[in-house]
Image (spheres, rainbow, N blue to C red):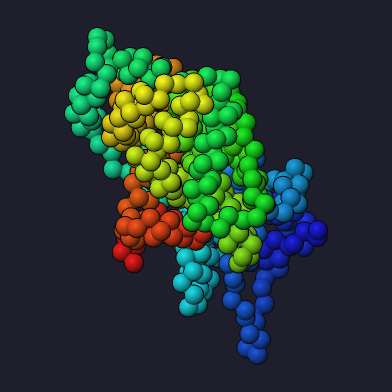
Amino acid sequence: MKISPFLTAGLFFVGCSPAAALAADPPAPVQPVPASISVVPMSIDDIVQDYIFFSLAMDKYEPGYVDAYYGPPEYAEILKADKPSLIELGNEFIKMMERLDAVPTGDDPLVAARKHFLSAQLEAAVTRHAMIQGEVFPFAKEAKGLFGVTPELRPLEEFDPVLEEIENLAPGEGPLSERVAAFENGYIIPKDRLQVVFDTAIAECKARTAQYFDLPEGENFRLEFVTGKSWSGYNYYQGNYQSLIQVNTDLPIFIGRAVDLGCHEGYPGHHVYNMLLEQNLTRGRGWQEFSIYPLYSPQSLIAEGSANYGIELAFSGQERLDYEREVLYPLAGLDPDTAAAYWALQIAKQALSGARMTIAQQYLDGEITREQAVALNQKYQLVSRERAEQMTDFNEQYRSYVINYGLGMEMVRDWIEAQGDAPVWRWKAMERLLSEPMLPGDLQSNLVE
């Protein structure tokens, strides 16, 4: 494939890489355009090539910045030989924002949404670029710059009444977190049964999603069990409707995680989200900016929020309990008669999700030490010390990204459930959310259609 010329600062550079073009001699002064010659307004497509290239260049400075890319491989090949400096990168993102501001959108609201989406992604790139260069933002400001929303953080003492209620579910001596951890240790999936339990759970997540979505023909995923990660599960979207789903086995995996990760990473979560964007926007409309997914961007709040809400969309509370008790518990070799007790504890613990953001903010803003963060995660997330350390590792690596899970789910739930009460309407709203250039602000401003 011939490499398309890049539009940089309003000029075409043919036959050289964008980075080389950046270092070229300044162009000659632009001559006035005769009145008889019409000027064609710049389009969003003129900017997208640079957006893709310079986002890939960011990944060279921060591996993992690009979460998924399935566009032309030639862009990545260029960067192997020549990449722009960090200063050039920052300048180019600013230039793209200025050029995008001048693009007309016409009367198509979806095109206007596209422009707004790309603008928000570029603003996040500028924020992350500053962080790569060493700038440190307060937690709330960082979250707003990267993900487009300012989290409302609750004082930890507001979660104390929840802990008091859970005391009744895990009676005994010693700290509550240790009692809860000891109770949950009876619900670990044996390692030799992980494959069959996860395969079965993901298949069920897919079947429930396929009742409402027409999934692309040939779509599939590959499941791997890995170690040495700060996360519990990850979806690496490969393009062409394929994903690699990894599950971390550093710590024991509880029976409830099979459905959680099956929905979150698979159906109707990350795998479906990326597939629908590829099908409807990258292929359907030719909007190539959706062939690349920068992790630190407002897109992640939509991705994580919808993936978490997708769990309860696919499985209502009682349906999930029944399914796990009747199908997954026997496969895992666990006692189905105890499923209700474990489920009641997991429901109660959901009310503590907001504490995770507060602890992350306090730690990342330097208000508490790492040891204090670990202890607070033990207390307010009711986990073992090993799992609390893993959560703190995650905060160190991904920082304010943590807001996308709890806050993202709340925002997605509010928006989807405002569209209707019947399951079919909620699934239709979910499909729209996963198929359009939606931003966190859209969830707040469009609660009523």
Residue that sits furthest to the top in the current view: 173
Say if 4 sits above or below 169 in the image: below
Say if 176 sits above or below 43 in the image: above
Task: Looking at the picture, tell me which residue is in the foreground, 384 or 166.
Answer: 166
Looking at the picture, how far across and down is residue 171, in whole percent? 24, 15
Side of 140 where 218 appears, left or right: right
Residue that sits furthest to the bottom in the current view: 36
Side of 123 where 199 appears, left or right: right
Q: Residue at x 66, y 73 (%)?
A: 30
Say if 404 sits above or below 186 in the image: below
Task: Looking at the picture, tell me which residue is in the foreground, 323 or 344.
Answer: 323
User: From where the camera sits, is residue 128 visible?
Assistant: no
Looking at the picture, how far across and down is residue 389, in whole percent? 43, 20
Looking at the picture, how far across and down is residue 314, in whole percent? 43, 46
Side of 2 where 431 appears, left or right: left
Looking at the picture, how far across and down is residue 302, in whole percent? 45, 50
Task: Looking at the picture, tell me which residue is in the foreground, 398 or 322.
Answer: 322
Quadrant for residue 93, please give it.
Answer: bottom right
Q: Residue at x 63, y 85 (%)?
A: 38
Q: Residue at x 61, y 65 (%)?
A: 284
Q: Quadrant where the C terminus lies?
A: bottom left
Quadrant for residue 45, please give it.
Answer: bottom right
Q: Quadrant where the N terminus lies?
A: bottom right
Task: Looking at the picture, tell me which residue is in the foreground, 429 or 98.
Answer: 429
Say if 260 sits above or below 8 in the image: above
Quadrant for residue 18, please give it.
Answer: bottom right
Q: Residue at x 33, y 28 (%)?
A: 340
How many labels, in total? Answer: 0
